[in-house]
């Protein structure tokens, strides 16, 4: 029987020919339709595996049933001049890849290339594209940096924890919500890890013990587990800039005279270990064992609201840590009024003495208040930029009943700043305050009593950064405040000396087509919470580092999935120059983003990042003079980076240090060969000390496989080699304890000159068993955590700390 056959040819979205069927009265016969010859088409020309003298060229060719072959033309100009060998494709019926390896290129050179496809239907040439080879790699670290190993060589076999916000990729790493911070002068760092022999046994996801390591001599670091012994609930929430003092939270009393079973905040003198409670008052209106609506409590750091309780929430401190501020939903002073179980009072604690902050100008207490911005804008009510002046004499707060913004001065008087206003930032002395009202950004000069509308065009989303004196303010607005701005997307502007300068149209969120640019966005470069930003201005305001998912300098930031990836940019006000410090100099497209530990593709790490999440301070990602920026990238930005994992980088401005390139120079600070990712922790103010966490063995003495903290330091010193000795001669001369810069008279004896451990530095059977059990279940924990992150990725307004806690 001769069957009639209808030939139908079409392509699906990938241009693939589809199977055809023949129909008869008796049976159904299916076969593959003949494919009509078609001229090949070329898409997606790109590069990968760029080096100093080699590169892989790639493109996708659509060929349908015609014999074809391809080769590439390449050279320093569009005349090309060189070709790769011809490769036969056969006669495929779908898209096919077409790679070619090119060798013998000149380092640091721009090349043009295109693919040429030949078939019976003719010759097809791809579009002209470019790439650059990496410059010849200089030996060692830039600017005379060297590695100093901060954590101990043995470290009792304990693992360190990665700060929340880090891109954990696929390795077995444990994240922590506890703070990691370097001293401003680079002579100490606080980090988190499994407890050692002095520790309290707290370990696992979002937990761990806090450690402080301090430099005690040339290249010598001394470490101490500073978790309060004998307690499980305490955890650190903040540190002073020199790490000489810190703030802890606990629902167990840590010092005498503190009411039992009430959560409390303590300030710790890290030189002596002495703890002082911010309040010793027994809450008159709340029972014990409860937690406030924005406190830590059983939900862990930054837990979700529990409106049935008393609790304390740390807001910040003066720079000398003599004035500390917190919220509590009870009346702890004689002039305070209890507003109910979900309404907070604001307090200042000075040497244990309490003063009420939320006092209205007429002297009446206002029992429903928040430091800085309202809590719904501030993501758990955490510290906003300069809400407390450097000396503690001024603190800004909001009446949540009326929306009015006030300033409390010297603990004795209150001044109305503006009605229905949202605090943004202030000068560090508190004399100039910036707030949004009706979509406009206003400045109130408290000293002169003058209020100025800085953005009459309105639609201000927030402030990304400002100078210490308030003369430079970086604003994000949806309106067009200056030529170049748009009304569809957020725009970054600089306000200075009465002039508004457009910098760039930016996209911070992953889903930029959605209307997510409302002022209530918790995670953005204009977030009121400085710990949730990546944007950071230098103290003089002349430079700003920030991130954007829109390409701002011409780099193609579309990854292989077609999604835009975030890149790090630096704007320099004096020259108006905008530089992409993280864009691949080879032109290689970025890799697909990976969910950060917060479950979002926001400032945490996708392809790269310049900040982890902290509640009360911001990681230093730019040096105070704006000449250096520190960040992470899972893209190789130099030839030495060959591991395909996240590594730590430094960008340096032209003319600074060793850099002599107009676009600036990028240097690899981590090793670039470890099978595990490396993470940027923090830097000193001047950028001379850069602290990173890595499994890589960056000094010869490091033979362990666990994470260690290193200081990539300008002028690093090699620790002295112990001399051979015997008997009492081995005792030697004690090392001098480290001295912290602020105040100069403080000797950090409690950390730098540690007493001997009270327990032997050996593992007990119980601890060994616990560690084995933890390692056994770590993979399942990580799998569950990654699943949770995927779910949380859709909730961009939620806190990155929701999943944490003890």
Image (cartoon, rainbow, N blue to C red):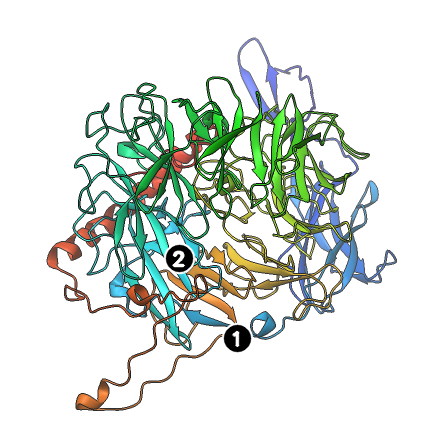
Q: Secondary structure at mark 1?
A: loop
Residue 305 x, y percent position in the rendering: 35, 25
Q: Is residue 744 above or below residue 43?
A: below
Instruction: Report crowding for label 1: few under 14, some 14 to 19, many 20 or more residues within 10 A (C-alpha).
Output: some
Q: Is residue 295 above or below residue 307?
A: below
Identify the mark at residue 243; answer none if there is no mark: 2
Residue 149 x, y percent position in the rendering: 40, 69
Instruction: Please indicate, yes or no, whether residue 6 appears anywhere in the rendered image.
Output: yes
Residue 688 is left or right of residue 163, and the answer is right
Residue 763 is left or right of residue 456, and the answer is left
Instruction: Please indicate, yes or no, whether residue 93 appears anywhere in the rendered image.
Output: no
Q: Is residue 254 above or below residue 25?
A: below
Q: Please tell me whether mark 1 or mark 2 is closer to you in this view.
A: 2
Residue 652 is left or right of residue 740, and the answer is right
Residue 680 x, y percent position in the rendering: 48, 56
Identify the mark at residue 715; answer none if there is no mark: 1
Instruction: Report crowding for label 2: few under 14, some 14 to 19, many 20 or more residues within 10 A (C-alpha).
Output: many
Identify the mark at residue 305; answer none if there is no mark: none
Q: Residue at x 57, y 37 (%)?
A: 425
Quadrant of the rendered structure where residue 119 is?
top right
Spot the residue most to the left. 765
Quarter of the image with the C terminus is top left
Q: Residue at x 19, y 53 (%)?
A: 229
Residue 506 x, y percent position in the rendering: 67, 37
Q: Residue at x 51, y 57 (%)?
A: 647
Sequence order check, earlier mark of 1 and 2: 2
């Amino acid at each position: 029987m001769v069957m009639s056959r209808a030939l139908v040819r079409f392509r699906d979205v990938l241009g693939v020919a589809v199977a055809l069927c023949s129909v008869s009265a008796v049976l159904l016969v299916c076969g593959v339709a003949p494919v009509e010859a078609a001229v090949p088409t070329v898409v997606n020309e790109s590069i990968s595996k760029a080096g100093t003298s080699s590169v892989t060229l790639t493109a996708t060719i659509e060929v349908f049933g015609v014999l074809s072959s391809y080769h590439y033309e390449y050279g320093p100009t569009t005349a090309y001049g060189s070709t790769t060998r011809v490769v036969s494709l056969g006669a495929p019926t779908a898209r096919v890849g077409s790679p070619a390896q090119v060798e013998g290129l000149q380092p640091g050179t721009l090349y043009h290339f295109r693919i040429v496809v030949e078939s019976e239907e003719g010759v097809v040439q791809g579009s002209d594209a470019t790439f650059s080879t990496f410059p010849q790699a200089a030996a060692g670290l830039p600017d005379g940096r060297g590695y100093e190993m901060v954590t101990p060589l043995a470290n009792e076999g304990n693992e360190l924890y990665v700060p929340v916000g880090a891109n954990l990729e696929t390795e077995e790493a444990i994240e922590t919500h506890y703070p990691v911070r370097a001293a401003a002068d680079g002579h100490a760092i606080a980090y988190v890890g499994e407890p050692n022999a002095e520790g309290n046994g707290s370990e696992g996801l979002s937990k761990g013990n806090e450690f402080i390591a301090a430099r005690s001599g040339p290249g010598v670091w001394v470490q101490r587990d500073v978790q309060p012994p004998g307690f499980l609930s305490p955890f650190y929430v903040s540190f002073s800039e020199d790490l000489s003092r810190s703030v802890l939270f606990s629902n167990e009393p840590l010092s005498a005279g503190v009411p039992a079973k009430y959560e409390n905040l303590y300030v710790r003198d890290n030189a002596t270990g002495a703890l002082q409670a911010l309040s010793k008052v027994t809450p008159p209106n709340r029972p014990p064992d409860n937690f406030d609506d924005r406190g830590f409590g059983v939900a862990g750091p930054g837990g979700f609201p529990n409106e049935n309780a008393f609790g304390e929430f740390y807001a910040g401190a003066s720079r000398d840590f003599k004035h500390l501020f917190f919220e509590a939903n009870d009346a702890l002073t004689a002039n305070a009024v209890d507003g109910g179980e979900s309404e907070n009072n604001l307090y200042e604690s000075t040497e244990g003495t309490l003063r009420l902050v939320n006092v209205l100008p007429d002297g009446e207490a206002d029992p429903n208040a928040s430091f800085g911005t309202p809590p719904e804008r501030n993501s758990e009510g955490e510290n906003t930029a300069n809400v407390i002046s450097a000396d503690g004499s001024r603190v800004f707060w909001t009446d949540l009943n009326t929306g009015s913004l006030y300033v409390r001065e010297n603990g004795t008087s209150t001044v109305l700043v503006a009605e229905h206003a949202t605090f943004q930032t202030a000068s560090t002395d508190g004399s100039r305050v910036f707030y949004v009202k009706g979509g406009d950004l206003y400045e109130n000069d408290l000293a002169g009593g003058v209020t100025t509308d800085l953005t009459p065009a309105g639609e201000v989303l927030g402030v990304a950064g400002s100078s210490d004196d308030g003369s430079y303010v970086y604003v994000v607005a949806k309106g067009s405040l200056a030529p170049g701005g748009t009304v569809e997307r957020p725009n970054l502007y600089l306000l200075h000396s009465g002039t508004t300068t457009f910098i760039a149209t930016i996209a911070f969120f992953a889903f930029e087509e959605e209307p997510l640019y409302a002022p209530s966005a918790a995670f953005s470069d204009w977030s009121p919470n400085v710990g949730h930003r990546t944007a950071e201005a230098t103290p003089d305001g002349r430079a700003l580092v920030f991130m954007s998912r829109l390409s701002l300098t011409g780099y193609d930031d579309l990854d292989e999935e077609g999604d835009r990836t975030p890149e790090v940019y630096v704007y320099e006000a004096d020259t108006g120059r905008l530089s992409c410090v993280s864009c691949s100099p080879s032109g290689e497209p970025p890799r697909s983003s990976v969910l950060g530990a917060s479950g979002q593709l926001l400032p945490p790490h996708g392809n790269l990042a310049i900040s982890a999440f902290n509640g009360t301070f911001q990681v230093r990602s730019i040096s105070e003079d704006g000449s250096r920026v520190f960040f992470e990238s899972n893209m190789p930005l130099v030839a030495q980076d060959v591991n395909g994992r996240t590594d730590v980088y430094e960008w340096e401005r032209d003319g600074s240090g060793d850099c002599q390139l107009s676009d600036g120079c990028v240097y690899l600070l981590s090793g670039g060969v470890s099978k595990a990712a490396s993470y940027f922790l923090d830097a000193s103010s001047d950028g001379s000390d850069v602290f990173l966490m890595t499994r890589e063995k960056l000094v010869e003495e490091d033979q362990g496989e666990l994470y260690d903290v290193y200081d990539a330091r300008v002028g690093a010193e090699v620790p002295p080699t112990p001399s051979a000795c015997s008997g009492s001669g081995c005792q030697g001369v004690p090392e001098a304890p480290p001295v912290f810069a602020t105040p100069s008279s403080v000797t950090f004896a409690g950390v730098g000159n540690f007493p001997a451990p009270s327990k032997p530095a050996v593992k007990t059977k119980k601890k060994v068993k616990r560690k084995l059990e933890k390692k056994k279940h770590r993979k399942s924990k990580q799998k569950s955590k990654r699943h949770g992150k995927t779910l949380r990725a859709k909730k961009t307004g939620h806190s990155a700390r929701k999943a944490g806690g003890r």
